[in-house]
Image (tube, helix red, strand yellow):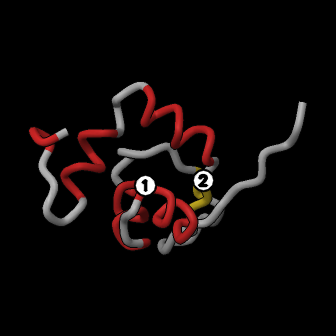
Amino acid sequence: MTHEPFVSAAEVAKYLSLSSRTVAKLAREGRIPAHPVSGSIRRTWRFKLSEISLALASHSLAPTIATQRPGCSAESE
């Protein structure tokens, strides 16, 4: 079994074609799988791309992503 590294919001943003701010917002709202790594008021989030991919494959994340991309709507997917 290989160890999967955590990635930053910037890497997830690139993977999902979203901004880093949007990824952080979705993490705060619990709409994407994320792991907080600091206990302060301003949290730092880390992600596992396998969890993001699984959420996309299960279609639980697709409507969320579609509504966050400019020029996209959930109906067009």
| First in sequence: mark 2 vs mark 1 | 1
> In the image shown, does 65 or 45 lie closer to the viewer?
65
On residue 47, the disc is: 2
Q: Amino acid at mark 2?
A: Phe
Please state, as top left, top right, bottom left or bottom right, where the C terminus lies in the image.
Answer: top left
> What crowding class fits label 1: few (fewer than 14 Cα within 10 Å), some (14-19), or many (20 or more)?
many
Query: Height in image: 77 above or below 11?
Result: above
Please state, as top left, top right, bottom left or bottom right, where the N terminus lies in the image.
Answer: top right
Where is residue 58? Give x, y as percent.
41, 25
Q: Residue at x 85, y 42 (%)?
A: 3
Q: Left or right: where does residue 34 sit relative to residue 17?
A: right
Where is residue 39? Give x, y as percent.
60, 64
Label 2 close to label 1 by CB (< 8 Å):
yes
Circle 1 SS class = helix
On residue 11, the disc is: none
Q: Which residue is mark 1?
A: 27
Where is residue 37? Give x, y as percent.
65, 61
Q: Residue at x 49, y 74 (%)?
A: 42
- The residues bearing labels 2 and 1 have C-alpha atoms spaced at a distance of 9 Å
Q: Left or right: where does residue 56 sit relative to residue 76?
A: right
Asked which quadrant contains residue 24, the reply is bottom left
Q: Amino acid at mark 1?
A: Ala
Q: Residue at x 45, y 34 (%)?
A: 55
Query: Height in image: 37 above or below 31?
Result: below
